């Protein structure tokens, strides 16, 4: 089994046809010859080259060069069975000559036109000089992005006697075989191709091949001049109509994920550096999605699949009798499990979007079959463990355009991550404060019923947003419905500030509710919050916090019963409940004292004495008493005496 086990969107053929009707400027590669003024090429340790380069200088170049490596995953290797050639770095080469500026400009313009790139934004940066001797070659591979904004590679062959060594460039089902030999004194052969194209250099049959290799990089675009597509008015309108029907309909996927023709790294994905067909389609979709009131982003699709394996010739693989040392010899026999998601979000305005991971759901990917022949970026074998046998695992990454109705953005993000939804809402409110109330109300409605089993910063972010919005009614709604139920102390700093904003009259019932709900699970954090609240402007211990203190004291027996010998004996588990340490015990009686609840404090002391296993009294009580001595007048109380 090859390819990715993914369910594509169905019944979207008309939209697919519209997307694919956008004209493809240029091609995946271009090549040609120049008969013009030659450059002066000076190599450190060798001197100025003559053209055609004589054998004596070839030998000097080999002596000054190093073996060219190749990349395999994260590793850089030297293996002449994969790549047999020599290289000299750009820092040791000086190009010049009176006519070279004109010749190089003409070559660069031809490469830009052939690739469909804007010539005024394409920059050629010398990378290295490559030298192939007779028999030299480079097996099929793809270039990595070696510089910021790199989109393609330009190879310029210098005159030297040789034969063979054709450059073969492939992209999807297309292939170009290019004769790169240049033998005349004033002849240059060049080829340019997008960096994600697979290419190889066939063996040199006779003589040598000497090439200057340049990284072709796109300079940042003019942000004041809007990018404009060719006259695709009817296509823009047709796509917009399809998207509007989808937006207003009750059926269909949550989002549409269009797989791009070219590959991009996560660091290199931006609308400014889109290649060929992808760039042309982006310019059309910017207009269509805007007309249809849809969001439009680029992102990286991640696929991880796990399954049973077999050899490429069909023989079943069970982990025994391994026939090679590389998982590349294997393919899937049956896919057992898969994980599919998007991240690395970039807007058409060039800004990164704070969406994090969003699931790629069945029926969202387009065009149908786009990833059927995808090659994995990584592949490895998992050894048998327990009841599970040997499995093959593959990881894929592919760039895509992602579209969804603008009105559903909050729904889509909140379904995946409330943190991402808050981050998006913050940006919207910063741009248009009038949106605050509506977005905050919906965030409260979407709030998950429980906290995730990890550090949860979402409530803190929401509290900051509420204070920024300045709506006391919405703030109190969030405090009553969410914080009173989920408080764990992580949001305390932001909560203090918001409590001061809403004021003691509104805060008092909320704090009493929180104390009753959360003291059992977070005793230390709850007590610290109440003590700090008593120091806020306008908050009075006996008036504002008396009900909260009573709620804590009423919950004390239940909290102590839930701990036996230091272990939690009831649900929720230990990470959501806390034992009464010395600090919490001190704060309990300090709060009661400040609120004037002497009788309740006395009953609390008696309750604590009934549960010695829950508080380890030999260590906890003396430490708590030492802390209480600093409170003026407290030592005369009956609870203190106990």
Image: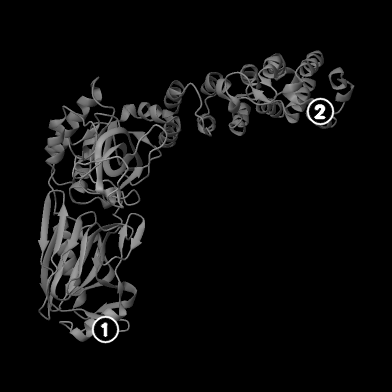
Outermost residue on the right side: it is: 636
Secondary-structure class at tag 1: helix
Left or right, 336 with reference to 21: right
Figure colour scheme: one colour
The quadrant holding residue 306 is top left
Task: Specify whether residue 405 is in view.
Answer: yes
- Numbered label attached to residue 195: none
Residue 56 in picture, x, y percent from top left: 21, 86
Q: CA distance from mark 2 to mark 1?
A: 85 Å
Q: Is residue 217 left or right of residue 356?
A: left
Identified at 45% across, 26% down, the residue is: 440
Q: Position of residue 519 (x, y in %)?
A: 65, 21
- Quadrant where the N terminus sits is top left
**Which residue is tagged 2?**
618
Q: Is residue 42 above or below residue 483?
A: below
Which residue, given by chain and number where applicable, does mark 1 sit on?
A: 60
Which element is circle 2 on?
A: helix
Between 283 and 297, the one nearer to me in the picture = 297
Q: Is residue 28 visible?
A: no
In terms of depth relative to the viewer, which is nearer, 308 or 10?
A: 308
């Amino acid at each position: 089994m090859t390819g990715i086990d993914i369910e594509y969107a169905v019944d979207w053929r008309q939209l697919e046809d519209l997307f694919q009707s956008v004209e493809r400027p240029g091609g995946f590669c271009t090549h040609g010859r120049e008969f013009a003024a030659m450059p002066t090429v000076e190599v450190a340790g060798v001197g100025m080259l003559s053209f055609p380069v004589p054998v004596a200088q070839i030998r000097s170049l080999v002596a000054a060069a190093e073996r060219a490596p190749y990349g395999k995953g994260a590793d850089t290797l030297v293996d002449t069975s994969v790549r047999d050639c020599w290289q000299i770095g750009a820092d040791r080469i000086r190009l010049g000559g009176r006519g070279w500026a004109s010749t190089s400009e003409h070559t660069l313009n031809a490469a830009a036109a052939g690739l469909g790139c804007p010539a005024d934004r394409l920059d050629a940066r010398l990378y290295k000089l490559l030298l192939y001797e007779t028999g030299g070659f480079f097996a099929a591979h793809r270039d990595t992005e070696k510089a910021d904004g790199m989109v393609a590679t330009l190879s310029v062959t210098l005159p030297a006697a040789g034969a063979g060594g054709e450059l073969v460039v492939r992209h999807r089902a297309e292939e170009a075989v290019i004769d790169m030999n240049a033998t005349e004194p004033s002849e240059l052969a060049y080829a340019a191709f997008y960096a994600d194209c697979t290419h190889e250099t066939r063996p040199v049959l006779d003589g040598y091949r000497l090439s200057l290799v340049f990284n072709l990089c796109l300079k940042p675009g003019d942000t004041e001049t809007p990018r404009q597509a060719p006259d695709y008015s009817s296509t823009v309108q047709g796509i917009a109509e399809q998207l509007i029907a989808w937006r207003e309909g009750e059926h269909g996927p949550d989002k549409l994920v269009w797989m791009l023709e070219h590959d991009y790294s996560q660091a290199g994905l931006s609308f400014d550096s889109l290649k060929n067909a992808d760039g042309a389609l982006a310019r059309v979709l910017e207009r269509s999605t805007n007309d249809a009131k849809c969001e439009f982003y680029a992102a990286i699709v991640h696929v991880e699949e796990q399954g049973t394996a077999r050899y490429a010739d069909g023989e079943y693989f069970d982990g025994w009798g391994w026939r090679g040392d590389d998982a590349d010899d294997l393919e899937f026999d049956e896919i057992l499990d898969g994980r599919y998601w998007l991240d690395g979000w970039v807007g058409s305005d060039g800004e990164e979007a704070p969406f994090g991971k969003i699931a790629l759901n069945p029926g969202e990917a387009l065009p149908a079959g786009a990833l059927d022949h995808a090659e994995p970026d990584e592949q490895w074998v998992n050894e048998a463990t327990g009841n599970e046998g040997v499995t093959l695992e593959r990881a894929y990454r592919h760039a895509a355009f992602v579209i969804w109705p603008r009105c559903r953005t909050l729904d889509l993000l909140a379904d995946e991550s409330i943190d991402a939804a808050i981050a998006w809402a913050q940006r919207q409110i910063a741009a248009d404060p009038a949106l605050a109330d509506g977005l905050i109300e919906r965030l409260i409605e979407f709030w998950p019923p429980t906290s995730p089993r990890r550090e949860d910063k979402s409530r803190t972010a929401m509290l900051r947003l509420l204070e920024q919005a300045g709506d006391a009614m919405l703030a109190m709604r969030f405090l009553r419905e969410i914080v009173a139920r989920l408080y764990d102390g992580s949001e305390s700093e932001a909560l203090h500030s918001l409590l001061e904003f809403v004021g003691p009259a509104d805060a008092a019932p909320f704090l009493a509710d929180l104390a009753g709900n959360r003291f059992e699970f977070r005793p230390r954090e709850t007590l610290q919050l109440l003590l700090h609240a008593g120091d806020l402007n306008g908050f009075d211990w006996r008036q504002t916090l008396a009900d909260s203190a009573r709620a804590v004291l009423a919950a004390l027996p239940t909290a102590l019963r839930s701990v036996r010998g230091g272990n939690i004996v009831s649900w929720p588990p230990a990470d959501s409940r806390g034992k009464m340490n010395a600090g919490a015990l001190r704060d309990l009686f300090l709060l009661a004292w400040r609120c004037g609840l002497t009788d309740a404090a006395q009953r609390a002391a008696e309750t604590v004495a009934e549960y010695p296993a829950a508080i380890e009294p030999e260590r906890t009580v003396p430490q708590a008493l030492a802390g209480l001595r600093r409170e003026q007048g407290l030592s005369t109380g009956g609870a203190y005496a106990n």
